[in-house]
């Protein structure tokens, strides 16, 4: 039996000889394209408003998503903040009611709601998708509820038909947090195109990135007009005058971000296809290893974004060794991985800090599925899925090696 790299053995994957793909990828061709675009913006002397390139990218991304309106913003968090206010026709300055957020997400989902004066109710997720559970959602609705924020976590689409049915029944707005789901599709529809608004992040780890940025997608001209006005210090899309003024913030991105996105959008589908191919290979291989369980992909997922590749770890199949021990061993074998969100967002230190000062802004319902997912998950990040097939084979091989050693 081969010695674990953790104990001084040879790692299955030598990352110095065969480095995992960097993100975002840099090639000579895309460097040339970006240089040309940056030069155009620089020479145009229009690096900000009136944002011709930002508007151009918005039109392109709207076409890609199949929505009528879209707004480029400074981050996924600001996109969520703008959308939350726009769909409720508010300015974020007075109490706005409750927003339902799944308990398995990044802290920014809830934080965006708090910043715009919503209270947050954390609700359980589905056992496989780790997305908002429609039954738990309906049971969690209170007279204060105004907005539902499903999150397409790790790039897995939430079950939008069921969520939208609950929203219609209770007359609630839906702001989809699709910050991790570029290119994902639910029953053939692009994630972010359903509900009252969909919000993307273009932060540096995301499958479509410009370093920092965000996007509000909507099929409502009213939602777009309000979001635009809020992001441009109260100025409406029609021009610079303050007609029909309302409170406004500054969430306008620079034109350089727009051109990065324009160029990278062209590569998104091919990268997505590659990630899907790698995920199919890993699902197949890992399903054959007792104690490792890849996520089951539901019939309605017509395209998975695989922002992260999750698997579940069952210690009893690995000699009772803990998930942390397994992760350390897998990392030492040259496979970068992490446990992801190790606790419910309702227990996150930031949530606890908000709750201490503002107990009225935090509520939670029982979340047994989220508990289990937090305890069992292991993530590989999206750029690993862009690796060569030969490198991907090292992943199941390393896991099998560790399993043998843990049982010895
Ligand atoms: C699920 C989710 N929501 C919101 C955000 C916030 O996006 P940003 O970092 O661009 O503000 C992120 C980013 O990591 C995210 O993963």
Image (spheres, rainbow, N blue to C red):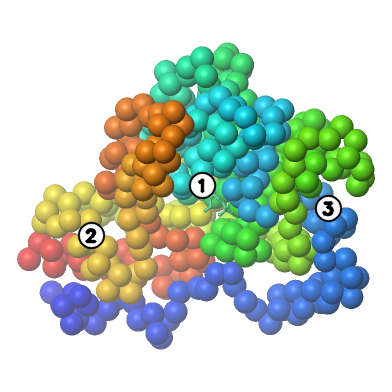
Q: Quick one: SS at disc 3? A: helix
- Proximity of marks 2 and 1: CB atoms separated by less than 8 Å: no
**Residue 385 vs residue 287, the one in the foreground:** 385
Q: Which residue is mark 3?
A: 55
Question: Mark 1 near ligand 1 (CB under 8 Å)?
Answer: yes
Tell me if mark 1 has few (under 14), some (14-19) or many (20+) residues whose alpha carbon lies within 10 angstroms of its own.
some
Please state the horizontal and vertical placement of residue 223, each as a whole percent of the image.
75, 33
Mark 2 or 1: the one toward you: 1
Q: Which residue is mark 2?
A: 324
The numbered mark, 1 or 3, whose residue comes first in the sequence reads 3
Instruction: Name the disc covering residue 108, or none.
Output: 1
The CA distance from mark 2 to mark 1 is 25 Å
- Proximity of marks 2 and 3: CB atoms separated by less than 8 Å: no
The CA distance from mark 1 to mark 3 is 25 Å
Position of the C terminus, as image quadrant, is bottom left
Q: Residue at x 88, y 66 (%)?
A: 46
**Is the residue 59 above or below the residue 204 in the image?**
above
């Amino acid at each position: 039996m081969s010695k674990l790299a953790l104990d001084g053995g040879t790692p299955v994957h030598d990352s110095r000889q065969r480095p995992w793909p960097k993100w975002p990828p840099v090639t000579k061709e895309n460097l040339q394209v970006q240089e040309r675009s940056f030069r155009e913006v620089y020479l145009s002397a229009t690096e900000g408003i009136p944002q011709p390139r930002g508007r151009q990218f918005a039109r392109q991304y709207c076409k890609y998503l199949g929505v009528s309106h879209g707004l480029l913003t400074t981050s996924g968090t600001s996109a969520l903040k703008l959308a939350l206010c726009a769909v409720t026709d508010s300015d974020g300055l007075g109490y706005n009611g409750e927003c339902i957020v799944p308990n398995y997400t990044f802290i920014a989902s809830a934080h965006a709601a708090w910043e715009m004066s919503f209270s947050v109710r954390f609700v359980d997720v589905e056992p496989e998708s780790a997305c908002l559970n429609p039954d738990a959602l309906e049971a969690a609705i209170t007279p204060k509820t105004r907005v539902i924020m499903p999150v397409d976590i790790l790039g897995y689409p939430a079950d939008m038909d069921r969520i939208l049915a609950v929203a219609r029944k209770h007359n609630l707005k839906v702001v989809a947090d699709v910050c991790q789901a570029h290119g994902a599709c639910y029953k053939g529809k692009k994630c972010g195109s359903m509900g009252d608004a969909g919000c993307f992040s273009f932060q540096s780890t995301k499958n479509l990135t410009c370093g920092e940025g965000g996007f509000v997608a909507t099929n409502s001209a009213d939602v777009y007009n309000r979001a635009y006005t809020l992001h441009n210090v109260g100025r409406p899309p029609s021009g610079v005058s303050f007609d029909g003024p309302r409170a406004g913030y500054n969430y306008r991105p620079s034109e350089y971000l727009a051109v990065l996105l324009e160029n990278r959008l062209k590569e998104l589908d091919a990268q997505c296809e590659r990630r899907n191919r790698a995920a199919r290979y890993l699902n197949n291989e890992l399903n054959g290893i007792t104690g490792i369980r890849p996520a089951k992909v539901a019939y309605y997922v017509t395209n998975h974004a695989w922002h992260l590749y999750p698997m579940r770890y069952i210690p009893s199949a690995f000699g009772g060794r803990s998930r942390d021990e397994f992760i350390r061993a897998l990392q030492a074998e040259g496979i970068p991985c992490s446990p992801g969100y190790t606790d419910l967002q309702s227990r996150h230190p930031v949530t606890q800090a908000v709750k201490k000062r503002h107990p009225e802004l935090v509520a939670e319902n029982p979340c047994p599925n989220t508990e289990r997912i937090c305890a069992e998950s292991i993530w590989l990040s999206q750029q690993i899925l862009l690796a060569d097939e030969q490198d991907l084979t090292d992943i199941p091989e390393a896991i099998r090696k560790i399993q043998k050693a843990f049982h010895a």
